[in-house]
Amino acid sequence: MSGRCGGVLPFFLGFLLACIVGWAVFPPLLYTDVEQPVRFSHKVHVEGQEMECDSCHFFRDDGSYAGFPTNEQCAECHAVDEPEAVVEAVRGVVGEDGKLEDILKLPVDEMPEELTELVQSGDEADVKAELDYLVKYAIQGKEVPWLNYQAQPDNVLFSHKAHEGLTFEMLKEKHVDLSGIVDDAVMEQGGDYNCNLCHLKDIEKTDTPPAFQRNVLTTYSKITMKMWQCERCHAQMGQVNACYVCHK
Ligand code: HEC
Ligand code: HEC
Ligand code: HEC
Ligand code: HEC
Ligand code: HEC
């Protein structure tokens, strides 16, 4: 009798353990959180500076999408007129052998004036982020390698131009099912920006961009749209789903 119990119980415990590992432990292990290279605040720029989305995310004259802004757009307000002089001043503090980034470890009042006079933020966290941007990128003339939460494989063709006219209202009217991409509540509420149909919701209101959840096997982010999700909307909107539409 006791032998029987001894046989079932370990099996049951093992089964339970496998379930716990499978449901709770493995999925988090599949993703690592990666931060954006600079803590860029949409709130500061969109609300505070009253900037329009398309001053940073715009279509080029040929219709292609510029995507992320470059230093050129930032320089309208974060111009570094004499980058060599700033780099030299920073070198004066960190030494010829030191790295420019080492300056960021010092308190602000120990940084050279050539650098601190460029800072426009007041709030402490914003000052830190702005200095990060200036030292690592702007004064060195390097572009920020922003992480794209929706990045697709190279063989996928996606065109922002083709989706420019999509609106929440239009999709609601056609009862397009976007579950898994857009929550019912967001869908109901609608919105001014059709970006929210496909991208991280309300990112334009955030101070700190959410972590990029990188799939350790594929390196794509967790929220990257899947093929069936593109195809579901296309089918419901009466679009052709031939392979060549989305693949090169
Ligand atoms: C001053 C420039 C600037 C303005 C203005 C701006 N953005 Fe951005 N946006 C960025 C930068 C930089 C990133 C990359 C860092 C990040 O994800 O926060 C970004 C990222 C995004 C993304 C995420 C793309 C992805 O990787 O999936 C969306 C969506 C977005 N912006 C929407 C908006 C909307 C909507 C507005 C207007 C309400 C707006 N942005 C205004 C600079 C800007
Ligand atoms: C229209 C002017 C303007 C443009 C264009 C602009 N900024 Fe700013 N930015 C500001 C001002 C002003 C502040 C300080 C705001 C405050 O403290 O109220 C600021 C603050 C910041 C900060 C600190 C706050 C935060 O966002 O975390 C960072 C970092 C920053 N900017 C990066 C950028 C980058 C990168 C670009 C280009 C993609 C850019 N800015 C474009 C005006 C601008
Ligand atoms: C129909 C879905 C959809 C809509 C609507 C949409 N995007 Fe995207 N976006 C994507 C996809 C998919 C990618 C990835 C493209 C790739 O990697 O080839 C992307 C990429 C981006 C990128 C990264 C740089 C790039 O061009 O690859 C930015 C920035 C961006 N979108 C901003 C926006 C903004 C701002 C809006 C609203 C004005 C918007 N998107 C509307 C699906 C969409
Ligand atoms: C919310 C609905 C929706 C989603 C999601 C969506 N699309 Fe579309 N897509 C459309 C519609 C509607 C059109 C046709 C627009 C037009 O012709 O005015 C279109 C057109 C296109 C076109 C242009 C086709 C042509 O003949 O010019 C391409 C390419 C495309 N989509 C790729 C994608 C990819 C790749 C994804 C997923 C990453 C995607 N779409 C996600 C609705 C969607
Ligand atoms: C509406 C756009 C769209 C259409 C139409 C489409 N694809 Fe895709 N496909 C994608 C996107 C986006 C991805 C990348 C995301 C993913 O893997 O789900 C992809 C990925 C793939 C992959 C890699 C799959 C993987 O999981 O690694 C293959 C293979 C593929 N597609 C084949 C096809 C074939 C064959 C057709 C025609 C029968 C087709 N696709 C039609 C959008 C599309």
Image (tube, grey):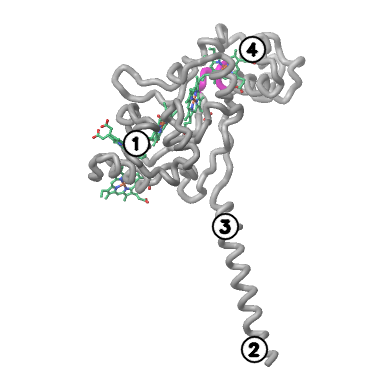
Q: Amino acid at mark 2?
A: Arg
User: Residue drawn at (45%, 48%), measured in percent from left and top?
Assistant: 218
Report the residue that reaches farthest toward the bottom.
1
- Residue 105 occupies which quadrant of the picture? top right
**Circle 2 residue:** 4
Q: Position of residue 231 (x, y in %)?
A: 32, 45
Q: Which mark is residue 173?
A: 1
The image quadrant that residue 133 belongs to is top right
Query: Is residue 2 in sight in this rendering?
Result: yes
Q: Which residue is mark 4?
A: 120
How many angstroms separate mark 1 from mark 2 (CA)?
61 Å
- At x 57%, y 7%, the residue is 82
If you read the primary sequence from the N terminus, does the residue marked by circle 1 or circle 2 appear first?
Answer: 2
Label 4 beta carbon within 8 A of ligand 2 = yes
Q: Position of residue 109 (x, y in %)?
A: 76, 15
Residue segment shown in magenta: 137-143
Which badge, 3 or 4, comes first in the chain's sequence? 3
Q: Which residue is mark 3?
A: 26
Disc 3: CA contacts within 10 A as few (<14), some (14-19) or many (>=20): few
Depth check, front residue: 239 or 24: 239
User: Would residue 47 appear left or right of 52 to someone viewing this image?
Assistant: right
Q: Earlier in the sequence, mark 4 or mark 2?
A: 2
Please tell me whether mark 4 or mark 2 is closer to you in this view. 2
> What amino acid is at disc 1?
Glu
Q: Is residue 155 visible?
A: no
Residue 158 is left or right of residue 137, and the answer is left
Quarter-wise, where is residue 89 in the image?
top right
Quick check: 18 above or below 108? below
Upstream in the sequence, badge 1 or badge 4?
4
- Observer-side mark, 1 or 2, equals 1
Q: CA distance from mark 1 to mark 4?
A: 45 Å
